[in-house]
Structure formats: C-alpha cells, structure tokens
Image: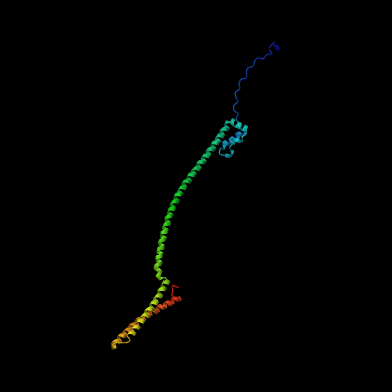
Amino acid sequence: MIPARPPKPGDHQTLPQRPPKPRAPDPPTQASPRSPAYTQAHNLHERPSAAASLPILADLQEEEMARLLADPETLEALYLTHSHTAQARHQQHLALLQQEQALQARITTLHTQANQQYKQACDAVSAARAKEDLWNREERAMYAALQPTTADALFTRLQAATTDAEKMSEALLASFLEGEVMSPGGGEGDAATEASGLAVGAFMKEYRQLRQVYHLRSEKLARWKEGRVGGFR
C-alpha cells in the first residue's frame, strides 16, 4: 500500500467553489386526491346541480384558499360548477318567463271572453226589461178588459139593474094611474069602453113584464147576498 503524500505548504487553502446552479422552480403542487379542497371541488364537479355542496369562499381558511388557488383542476371544477349553476338558473328564469307569457295570454283571452259575455248579458237584460214592460202593458189591458166580469162589477150591475127595473115598473104604474085620474071613464059608449080596456090590457101586460124582471133580479140579488151564487163567493 503506497503511503499518502504529505501535504505541501498552502494545501490548506481551499479553491473557490462554483456557485450553485439556479434551481428550477418547483411545479405547482397538485392537491392530493385526499385533500379537503380537492374532494370538495371534485364533488362539485360531479354534482354541479347540488347547491348545498357549493364552496363558500368566505368561510375557507387561508391555507385552503392557497391550496385552491394552486390547484388548476379545482379552480376549473369550481368554475364549471358556477357555470352549470348559472345555466340552470337561466333555464329556470326562461321557464318562468314562458309560464308568465302563457298566463298573460290566458288572462288576455279570458278578459276578451268576459267582455263579450258582459255585453251579451247587458243585451239580454235590456231585452228582458223590454219584455217586462210589454207584459205589464198587456196585463193592465187584460185586467181592464176583465173588469166588467169581476164579481164586484157583476154584483154592482145586478144591483143597479134591479133598482132600474123597480123604478121602471113604479113609473109605469104611476103614469097609468095619472091617466086614469085625468080621464075617469069619459067617452062615447062601447068605443070608449073598448079603448079603455085595450089600454088597461096593454098596461097590465107591460107592467107584469117589468115586475117579472124586477122580481127575478131581486131573487138573484138576494141569493148573491146570501152567498148562494156559485163561482163568486
């Protein structure tokens, strides 16, 4: 074994060392599949319609925000989540707008129909009132035509006719008696007697007829007063 050479004077001085090569920056660290930020973003990406799983950035810690900003996939998933949510809300707004337009069209149609029905109802009411006025006029004319045949009118007429028959018979009797008094059997023989007999016969016949009418009407009037006339009492 060859012994090592002894150091010479000045060997203890070290040579200047080369500066270290600049180190390339480390690539951005990807979130671990088990990190909370990755799991949350992954769930949001898988279920973008679940509003309850959206991350609330204001509630994240500084470290979680740093990991979220350092993870492009998580940021993309978060962006896609918000994009899907906005699109879903836009679709909901469009659906509500379409429903509102349909309801507005329906309301317009119902309003037009209501106006038409209101006009028809007004026309029907006007026609009904005109018919009611016509009916009232016809009814008054009918009662006026039936007035002479009512029970009260017939009773009044019968009572007046009975009184007239009695007055006529009494007037005829008074006229005959006055004639007899003014010409008490004066005349020439059989001719005067015959003429007087004819006058008496005519008087008796006419007087008997008047009294017959009078008594018939009196009987009817008495029965009416007693309620023995059917159909009126």
| 53 sits left or right of 187 in the view | right
Report the front residue among 184 and 62: 184
The image quadrant of residue 81 is top right
Q: Quadrant of the C terminus?
A: bottom left
Report the front residue among 72 and 189: 189
Q: Position of residue 168 (x, y in %)?
A: 37, 78
Tell me if residue 228 can be seen.
no
Tell me if residue 167 can be seen.
yes
The image quadrant of residue 209 is bottom left
The residue shown at (40%, 67%) is 144
| 59 sits left or right of 210 in the view | right
Residue 202 sits above or below residue 230 on the image? below
Q: Quadrant of the N terminus?
A: top right
Residue 35 sits above or below residue 220 on the image? above
| 135 sits left or right of 51 in the view | left
Report the front residue among 114 and 48: 114
The residue shown at (45%, 76%) is 225
Outermost top residue:
9
Residue 127 sits above or below residue 214 on the image? above
Q: Position of residue 71 (x, y in %)?
A: 59, 31
Report the front residue among 49 and 68: 68
For the rendered model, the colour scheme is: rainbow
Q: Position of residue 181 (x, y in %)?
A: 34, 85
Q: Position of residue 216 (x, y in %)?
A: 40, 78
The image quadrant of residue 67 is top right
Outermost front residue:
182
The residue shown at (47%, 48%) is 107
